[in-house]
């Protein structure tokens, strides 16, 4: 009960501090994926499209009603992404191959958004992570106005982007800010990819180094710094209060190329050549009302 109270208090304080220039940046394919497999979890022959369509828009609308952002930017992966797989063939290898019915569902959602005047941001050959990272960088450093930015996603890779005005909204009961990451991992967000490069991450099929879990990785980072700082002088590890120091140093020496490869895979690019006109993404109070009215009129054609 106390945890729920503190979370509700955090949401309340965030809403109070929100300025009128708050922005939702939505990792659209993850929302499409979640809404689809809530209903079609067994990938049945008789695929249901209507229910997941409503779930998709309701998930976003429920957050919109709480935070009432002035702008919403929908971002999608490009269909053909090969850049990171060229670096590491195992990258995200454990992700499901997209079924025909799921690809059709993606197209349906995209069609609905486009017909309602939504300009989905897609950049050739790039992941949504990098597009979102670049957009956030541009919003923070290219405009005179300060914005509160809320990333709507279920991807922990975005932890590295969290700052005093950038938050990750996984759902209405899970908001990730600097304090959340500091309390859970005992590091600041800027070091999150260093942490995962050392300790690993199953969701992206990054193994990390044997013998270095999250706790040891956070101790090393807090006392020494980034991956570059660690490799500048590995002997500093000998001064730390952790077990198996010799094995950790040896593992770091033997796997330097792998650690830097994982670190590179986890990096979110902030410098794509994307032009951003923030005014294009302003939404009115009737945005979702119009979408749900549209759905009631035409959704049967998607059966």
Image (tube, rainbow, N blue to C red):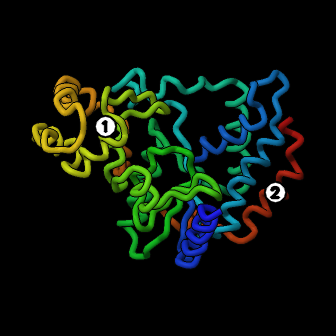
Label 2: few (<14), some (14–19) or many (≥20) C-alpha neighbours in 10 Å: some
Residue 268 shown left or right of residue 24 in the figure: left
Q: Which residue: 47% across, 51% down?
A: 132
Kind of element beneath mark 2: helix
Q: Which residue: 67% across, 24% down?
A: 99
Considering only vertical position in the picture, is 301 above or below 172?
A: above
Residue 285 placed where, x, y %? 72, 71
Cβ atoms under marks 1 and 2 closer than 8 Å: no
Residue 69 seen in the figure: no
Q: Which residue: 56% across, 49% down?
A: 153
Q: Nearer the viewer, residue 152 or 124?
A: 152
Kind of element beneath mark 1: helix
Q: Nearer the viewer, residue 108 or 198?
A: 198
Label 1: few (<14), some (14–19) or many (≥20) C-alpha neighbours in 10 Å: many
Residue 241 placed where, x, y %? 21, 44
Dot placed on the residue nearer the N-terminal end, 1 or 2: 1
Residue 294 seen in the figure: yes
- Foreground label between 1 and 2: 1
Q: Which residue: 47% across, 30% down?
A: 202
Where on the picture, by quarter, is residue 173? bottom right
Number of marks: 2
Residue 263: image tag: 1
Considering only vertical position in the picture, is 265 above or below 163?
A: above
Residue 146 placed where, x, y %? 43, 74
Considering only vertical position in the picture, is 19 above or below 257?
A: below
Q: To which residue does mark 2 refer?
A: 292
Q: Nearer the viewer, residue 172 or 88?
A: 172
């Amino acid at each position: 009960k106390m945890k729920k109270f503190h979370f509700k208090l955090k949401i309340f304080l965030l809403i109070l501090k929100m300025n009128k220039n708050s922005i939702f940046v939505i990792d659209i394919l993850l929302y499409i994926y979640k809404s689809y497999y809530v209903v079609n979890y067994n990938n049945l022959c008789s695929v249901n499209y209507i229910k997941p369509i409503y779930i998709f828009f309701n998930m976003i609308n429920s957050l919109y009603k709480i935070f009432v952002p002035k702008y919403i930017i929908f971002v999608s992966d490009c269909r053909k992404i090969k850049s990171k797989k060229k670096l590491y063939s195992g990258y995200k290898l454990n992700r499901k191959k997209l079924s025909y019915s799921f690809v059709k569902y993606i197209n349906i959602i995209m069609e609905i958004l486009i017909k309602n005047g939504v300009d989905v941001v897609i950049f050739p050959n790039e992941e949504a992570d990098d597009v979102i990272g670049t957009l956030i960088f541009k919003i923070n450093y290219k405009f005179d106005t300060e914005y509160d930015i809320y990333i709507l996603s279920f991807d922990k890779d975005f932890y590295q982007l969290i700052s005093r005005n950038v938050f990750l909204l996984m759902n209405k009961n899970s908001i990730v800010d600097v304090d959340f990451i500091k309390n859970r991992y005992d590091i600041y967000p800027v070091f999150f990819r260093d942490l995962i490069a050392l300790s690993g991450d199953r969701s992206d099929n990054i193994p990390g180094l044997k013998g270095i879990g999250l706790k040891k990785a956070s101790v090393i980072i807090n006392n020494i710094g980034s991956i570059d700082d660690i490799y500048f002088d590995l002997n500093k590890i000998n001064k730390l209060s952790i077990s198996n120091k010799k094995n950790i140093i040896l593992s770091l020496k033997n796997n330097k190329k792998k650690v830097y490869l994982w670190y590179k895979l986890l990096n979110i690019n902030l410098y794509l050549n994307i032009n951003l006109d923030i005014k294009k993404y302003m939404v009115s109070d009737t945005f979702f009302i119009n979408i749900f009215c549209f759905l009631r009129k035409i959704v049967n054609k998607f059966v």
